Image (cartoon, rainbow, N blue to C red):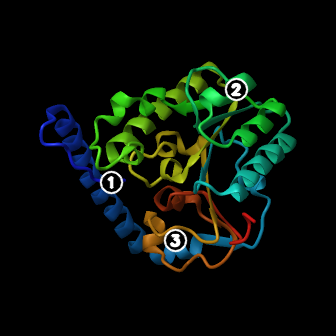
């Protein structure tokens, strides 16, 4: 996330920016604390972390999981293919279970996505969601439409630009809180369904500030993250364990008690050329 500056003549903006920068500072302290905890348990965590060149990813998801988070690095077609594969394999493995997909990439209107709404509600990945609708998997949006309004953009300086809107500390926390509320409401309405939550890993890693995945019960929640080529150094785990991940493969835990601290239950690194 980013710190931003307010225009000196805009008191409303100054208040919002002050809240953002205070939250940004607190978030940085939290991340540093997480990195220290990971380093303090380096030996135990390293011994528990298991590696396989390939694996049946669905078999690694506990059958008891009700909230399955799939966290991506954006703009990677190979990851989208993996997500589709997981959804298809999960349905084949558990044909009796009904699936709902909730996602960052569709605007939230409290109703499932319809083909005629693609242009109005889908912010990216149209082919991906078209296929899910053909498979009759209900798709619900998580993103609050007001997050894209001009009024919200005016909270932040013109110099920073609208690209900063969705990634400031205040914006991320606001978005994540809304997503948690939406997911819990969906679970209350459809308690027998299994919820796949597909979003950027900045929202789905357990150990990120205001994590969406961390808001749900441990025994019912599972988080899998995806990268192409290599993991990214900005995560608390990668800062504490630089160089642990070498090349493509699947990492998972012998002792799952470390998953929340590390940020993931399973981490998948696809080959560097997977997007070709």
Q: Residues within 10 Å of mark 3 (few under 14, many from 20)?
A: many
**Quadrant (top left, top right, bottom left, bottom right) of the C terminus:** bottom right
The residue wearing badge 1 is: 2
Give the x, y percent position of residue 160.
Answer: 31, 50
Residue ID at (29%, 44%): 158
Asked where in the image residue 63 lies, by quadrant, the reply is top right
Give the x, y percent position of residue 95.
Answer: 86, 36
Work out whether mark 2 precedes mark 3 in sequence or the reverse, and give the earlier one: 3
Give the x, y percent position of residue 206.
Answer: 49, 52
Relative depth, front residue between 106 and 195: 106
Work out whether mark 2 precedes mark 1 in sequence or the reverse, and give the earlier one: 1
Q: CA distance from mark 2 to mark 1?
A: 39 Å
The residue wearing badge 3 is: 45
The mark found on residue 192 in the picture is 2
Identify the secondary structure beneath mark 1. Answer: loop
Asked where in the image residue 220 lies, by quadrant, the reply is top right
Give the x, y percent position of residue 92.
Answer: 87, 42
């Amino acid at each position: 996330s980013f710190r931003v500056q307010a225009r000196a003549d805009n008191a409303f903006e100054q208040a919002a920016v002050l809240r953002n920068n205070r939250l940004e500072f607190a978030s940085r302290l939290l991340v540093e604390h997480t990195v220290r905890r990971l380093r303090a348990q380096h030996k135990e965590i390293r011994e528990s972390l298991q590696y396989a060149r390939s694996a049946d990813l669905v078999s690694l998801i506990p059958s008891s999981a009700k909230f399955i988070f799939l966290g991506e690095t954006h703009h990677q077609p190979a990851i989208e293919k993996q997500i589709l594969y997981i959804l298809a394999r999960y349905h084949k493995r558990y044909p009796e279970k009904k699936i709902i997909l909730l996602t960052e990439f569709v605007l939230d209107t409290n109703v499932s996505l319809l083909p005629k709404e693609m242009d109005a509600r889908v912010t990216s990945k149209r082919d991906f969601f078209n296929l899910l609708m053909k498979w009759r998997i209900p798709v619900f949006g998580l993103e609050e439409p007001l997050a894209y309004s001009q009024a919200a953009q005016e909270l932040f300086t013109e110099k920073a630009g609208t690209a900063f809107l969705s990634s400031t500390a205040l914006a991320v926390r606001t978005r994540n809180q809304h997503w948690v509320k939406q997911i819990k409401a969906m679970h209350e309405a459809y308690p027998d369904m299994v919820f796949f939550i597909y979003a950027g890993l900045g929202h789905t890693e357990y150990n990120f500030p205001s994590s969406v995945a961390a808001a749900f019960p441990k025994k019912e929640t599972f988080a899998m993250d995806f990268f192409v080529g290599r993991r990214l150094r900005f995560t608390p785990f990668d800062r504490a364990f630089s160089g642990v991940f070498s090349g493509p493969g699947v990492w998972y835990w012998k002792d799952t008690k470390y998953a929340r601290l590390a940020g993931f239950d399973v981490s998948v690194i696809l080959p560097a050329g997977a997007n070709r």
